[in-house]
Image: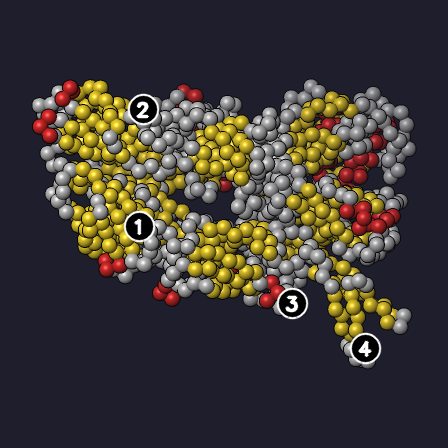
Amino acid sequence: PPYVDVQVTAPAWSAVALRTGGNGSKGGAAVLALTCEASSLQSRLTWVPLPALATLRAEGPCSPAGCSLLLVLADPSPTVQAEDDLVLAVSGVAFRDAGAPKMVVVSRSGGSIALRITLPPMTSAGALVGTLTPTAGPEGIEASAFAVSFALNVTSLTPRVVSVSPELVPESGASVTVQLADLAPVAGAGSLSATLGGAPVSVTGVLFSDAKGTGLTVAVPARAPGTAELRVQVAGLDGEAAVLVVVVSSAYTISCDGGRCKVPASGGALAVELEGFGSATASSLSAAVDGAAASITAFAPGTASLSIPAHPVQPLPEPAAPLVLTVSGPGGAVAVAQVHYIRAPQLRRVVFNEAGTALRFELDAPSDAPSGAVACAGLVQGPAPGSLGLTQTCTWASASLLEVLMGANASVLPGHAVSLLASALRTADGVSDVSGALSAVVEAPTIPWAPELTVRGPSDIGSCDAARFDVEVRSTRPLVYEWTCDSCSEGDALIARLALVSGGTHRIDGADLVPEVPYTIGVRGRTFLGATSQVTQRVLTARTGPTPMLTIVKPPGPYVRGNDMYLTSTAEFSSCATSEAPLEYAWTVTSHADQAVVLESHGAVLHIPKNTLAGGARYDVRLDGTSAGAAARASDSLSIQRSPLSARVAGGDRTVFRRDAALIVDASASADPDACVLDAATGEMAGCGEGLAYEWTCALPSGLQCRLSATQAVASFGTASTASLDLSALDLGAAPSIVLGVTVSKGERFASASVSLALADEPVANVLIVWSGELAATDSSGAVRVDAQNGRLVLWTDPVEPGSSFKWDVVGPGLDTTSGAVAVTQANGFASGLTSAELALNLGDMAGLVLGGRYTVSVQVTLPSGLRGVAGMTVSVNRPPSGGQCAPQLTGSERALMDAIEIGCEDWWSDMLPVSYQVGVKGEGDAGYSWSSPSFSESSQVRLSAGRYSLLVRIADALGTATLSSELALELAETPPPAFDNSSLAVAGDDAVAAQIEGLFERMDGLGNVQQLMLASESVVNSGERATGATCGGVCVGADVGGDSVVKQAAQQRSRGGAAGQVECGQTRSRVNAQTQSRVLTVNHCSCSIGAQTQLLVRLSLTVTASSTRSSYDA
């Protein structure tokens, strides 16, 4: 009670019915106990939270022409993983042509799922009601209990004019083509009517009418020069679409450079060309804009300079309809044209990115801001000093988007006001006034990133021990945590203690737990943007014996099939243990679905090779440790996400002939990484495109879809991985370019890519640009992201015709090769020059590259026949991880060598995850740092001998781009403790130090703690008398690293065009106590180096020698 009402429905022992109450909205688990005539049974009862509609947003107007909806469901049924797991029912509206809504999963993370629903054209407006129901509910619960409904008003919109051609109509009359948007498809010209200046005109035809828009032709009759409003009425709709039509004289014309006459909103100078005013003088001309006088400041036959007045409406609305410029001359000469007033860029909004790491300042128009990284000082301002973090990184990602990556300790929140102080900002063409300071209120992202928690902690502890649980999460700001005991009985004191914890670390004493009873500890995290994680659980049991405490350390998620994974163990002997015999480790990975064993391994580190686990599956990981008969176990799980699809169109942006009847575009390099299998014959991955569906699109610069000249239907190009385009059949008009895009999909996953094709009026050489690289990858925008510290990028053209000439250019922030010259500081970066068939970029040698900058790499190829072709691509320079800090966690009483120094890092972020950490240690007088191997854990431990040290942490992202933490100073005093209890030698005096070292190494070796063992040995070596010069013999050559010998890896690096692989081995020997020499510590430190960036510590041999005893430890 009060949750369970028991009714005995029959005398049979098996028929007992239970009716439970709810558990609020949280869900969770409880212990169900049933007692009957002194017999007791227990089971687990789980409450599943019901879903709720967290977000419903229409992406644009929702009208009978159709619309797109974005929905976020909180706590969806656990049976829902893809759109196929949901059924959508819609009522209140009817769809045209038997259309049906389409639904796709945008993301599923934490306790929410985001869906995009596309509604096709509808027959009329109305109140739409939708219901989402899972195809199946959790075991024992009807699916209908998890149905979620939403309501939306579909309203009729006023049709709007997208384009009119020609913009200027001759006085003799013409047929004008008008394209409308926000309009449901119409049956024909009979559904439309039009007026010009209030007088009816004929709608002569409907070129097309579909979900993309409606195109019609209107007959404009002969009329005197001037302006008139063309209005288009749709039968059955109240609204009209209107556009200003300018009728010009064939004898007198005004034109401007670039085709359109444009001035700032405040007015200004305008240079025009005049035809028909041959005998006029400056004094005989007059000009006006919608009746307001405009000054003629200069005049020469054929040209004039005008001073245009400010727009009568200030501030200028957006969009602002053009006004009419009239120039009058002698003899009744009148010329008219449209003047477009251009508003300075304004802040459309400022919004957090999904992760909350950056602010996106979005302008309403492209600006003249410089591309790439810029200084933040004087550019952006938060609501208070320091509210954007200790340091910020500002990057103009595009002409209308400034991204501000915030630093550590940022405090700005949704609802705060921020400012863009770029007072000199103008539109991209430089026409507008300067923008001045712009302010906006920060918005939260539509779908904030839901954190994924990784909880470290033991599964078994002794009754005299304490379990420490640490939550690690990818976040630049601390989360608020909720800890629960999901298996505790009501009233258990542990529930109350956990309720008081809001941080990410908690200790549980074994003495507070009932021995041999498993406790399920749960934790859920919430970000400052309100996104919550799923509950992560750990099972903890207090054993009656002194069990070793094992913890599995796994990298942060998400986990995908195509990445290697390394899981490491950390261990501590129980405080109750009477002996500390070495631990033996055994790993087992099993499929959660059928418990089939997938992988078994031994040792302190588990390597799961890429492509071992299946995407979309869950696996259980078990680590068993034994020490002198004492056994311990740690368990965890890995949920392998389906890998994101990769869409790629070959060849890059390029120039093509606008009449090419057989242009081939190829997206066969697109891939589903989960489908790739290793071809044993070639050693390459094959089958990556298996099961992919392709959808091609073609768009004009205006954003309108390409249409066929013959039928005006939207052009389609099939569903194959390659498409053949007949450009001569498309209605491209005078468009300077088109954008070809492809969307690849497989189930709920999809990805898109596009290329821009410049249209040439004459035949050109068909040039494709191809790339490969080290420390390079394609990012979400389609650009090739590179590591500027050590990356290498090689580009070439395909096909290559003998006798062709080449000219490569790289243009971007701090770099421009269009003059043909390369700065001396950058010469080493262009290994093959700029006129070879191949462009090799050694990015680490290219001074001046801006982190976060975007660069255009282009090549012009001239064939022996004289035909020329151009192709190009965008290269984005990766930014290193930022926003965080690292610091040692010191109590002030640390003992040299005896106590582990914990170095914690927090708030580091990169959009190339995961982030790894390496600790560097440099003693006083040392030439350089000794580095640990990379770890995905945010905290590391080192043990050091007495002395002064500098500590650094190297933080690197998945691409290898790294940054260093601030230098951390540490001093440890000489504090020789008593010898270890398990040391076999009785020691005193100077020998106590050596015994201390021996015991320390014995303990770390027994625990399999290789990282601490190596760094501690470095510390000891550097503090003792050193002898060098020995070699490691064949150790390096025979070393097995990931299945390959070091020599083989070096050869592979050379074959990829990298730096010459060098295999070098060396041995360092150190004598700790040179006075008595009763004990000698010898450290054989064998290290192998491949190139400049990859270093492998293959073997570490530690030998302590006394008069009659020898102890050796190998790592």
Report if the CB atoms under discs 4 and 3 are less than 8 Å apart: no
Given residues 810 and 92, the one toward you in this image is: 92
Is residue 331 toward the left or the right of residue 111 in the image? left
Upstream in the sequence, badge 1 or badge 4?
4
Q: Nearer the viewer, mark 2 or mark 4?
A: 4
Question: Which marked residue is nearer to the observer: mark 3 or mark 2?
Answer: 3
Residue drawn at the location 65% of the way across and 51% of the way down: 534
Question: Disc 1 residue type?
Answer: Glu
Q: How would you rate the neighbour count of disc 1 (Cα within 10 Å): few for under 14, some for 14-19, many for 20 or more?
A: some
Query: In the image as oriented, which residue stretches furthest toward the bottom?
Result: 11
Q: Nearer the viewer, mark 4 or mark 3?
A: 3
Residue type beneath disc 3: Ile
Q: Earlier in the sequence, mark 4 or mark 3?
A: 4
Question: Circle 3 is placed at which residue position?
Answer: 141
At 63% from the left edge and 28% from the top edge, which residue is drawn?
A: 965
Residue 13 is labelled as 4
Q: Is residue 555 left or right of residue 266?
A: right
Q: Quadrant of the N terminus?
A: bottom right
Residues at marks 1 and 3 touching, judged by CB atoms closer than 8 Å: no
| 1 or 2: tag closer to the N-terminus | 1
Residue 545, horizontal then vertical, whole percent: 87, 51
Give residue 514's position: percent from left, percent from top.
86, 54
Residue 769 on image: x %, y %: 35, 40
1079 relative to 580, above or below:
above
Distance between the alpha carbons at the discs numbered 3 and 2:
71 Å
State which quarter of the image contains the C terminus.
Answer: top right
Q: Is residue 750 visible?
A: no
Question: Mark 2 vs mark 4: which is more N-terminal?
Answer: 4
The nearer-to-camera label among 1 and 4 is: 1
Q: For the residues marked 1 and 4, what is the alpha-carbon distance in whole angstroms?
A: 77 Å
